[in-house]
Image (cartoon, rainbow, N blue to C red):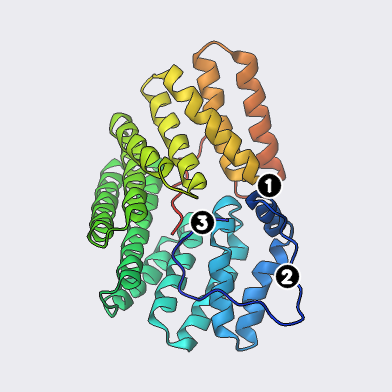
Amino acid sequence: MAGRRLTVEPEVPPLPDVPDADLGTAKSQALHWMEANRQVLYGAVALAHDSGRDQDAVALAESLWTHFLDHPRHADAIDAFRAAVAAADRTESVPARIRTRCLLARPLWETARFEEAAAALDRAGALAALLGDEFDDRRLAASAVDFRGQLALAEGQWAAAHRDADTAREHFAAARADFDTARAIHLAIDNAYGAALQTYQSAKAAAAADDPTGAAELFARAYRAFDGMTGRQRMTARARSGLGQALLRVGRYPDAEPHLAAALADAEARRSTFDEARIRTDLATLADRTGHPDEAAHHRAKAAELRAAHGGVPDESAPEEPHPEEH
């Protein structure tokens, strides 16, 4: 689904006499299979934990991460990732204990449970101090710093939405500092993808801090980097979406349209209702500003339909969702 990415558990080998699920021949078919079977898959994490299969619980939780980003059903994710944290603690594996706490923190902060998310990430940061200097250890340490930055970004957006500008600025500055730190770690270990991801995260922080010109420059850099990599279509599309939104905000409408259209096509192919609703809202704004009211009405109606049919998709008044990442 996501290409090569950070995981702490090894791939499970084929099991004798047990057939694999039929995921089809394309990534989109695998994504659709996961969405259709989501209740079983999320429930399997708790089942593995309750059965004492702790490594399986962690591995299952990791495999659900990208699905959660596309289909954020927070209650299911919190239950599953809490079970994975408990399982990781029983294994006494430092990487697993860090990784699962990072996974849990996101659905917590996305439901404004900031203190719980901070506690999980504080513990992950303390555990990261025990890691070594190997590539995988440094990449995991950078990921823990990045998640801390994402929490700060989310807290800043919350403060801005509640008209606390001073607190918002403090959080946005903290987020940028964490993303810069994580990027430096990735550059030190020659991890081009990780460095590009932190550029993308910094672009989101600039956009949230009401610096669309700076955000557009950073999103453009991230887009070019992802577009030059094999198997990174999802993050390429996310960077294009951010770039299109930033260009829209600075009034560069002809430049914004192709980026938003490409991001919409990707979201539709992945059946990511969250992304599709968000991008259609941007396209509606673009259509309004370029004198196409019928097109704007179509996008808004489709976005409303998605919001009514699926949980976890934003409405037009919500701040931009701080999507990351494919850690």
Residue 237 spot, x, y in % from top left: 49, 40
Q: Nearer the viewer, residue 326 or 228?
A: 228
- Whether label 2 touches label 3, CB < 8 Å: no
How many C-alpha atoms fall within 10 Å of the one at disc 3: few (<14), some, or many (≥20)? Answer: few
Q: Which mark is residue 3?
A: 3
Residue at image point 54% right, 32% down: 262
Residue 162 spot, x, y in % from top left: 40, 43
The mark nearer the N terminus, 1 or 2, is 2
Looking at the rendered structure, the number of numbered marks drawn on it comes to 3
Q: Quadrant of the C terminus?
A: bottom left
Q: Which mark is residue 20?
A: 2
For the residue labelled by badge 3, is the local secondary structure a helix, a strand or a loop?
loop
Where 244 falls versus 130 (above or below)?
above
The mark nearer the N terminus, 1 or 3, is 3
Q: CA distance from mark 1 to mark 3?
A: 26 Å
> In the image, 69: left or right of 268?
left
Residue type for callout 3: Gly
- Whether label 1 touches label 2, CB < 8 Å: no
Residue 265 spot, x, y in % from top left: 60, 35
In the rendered image, which residue does mark 1 sit on? 310
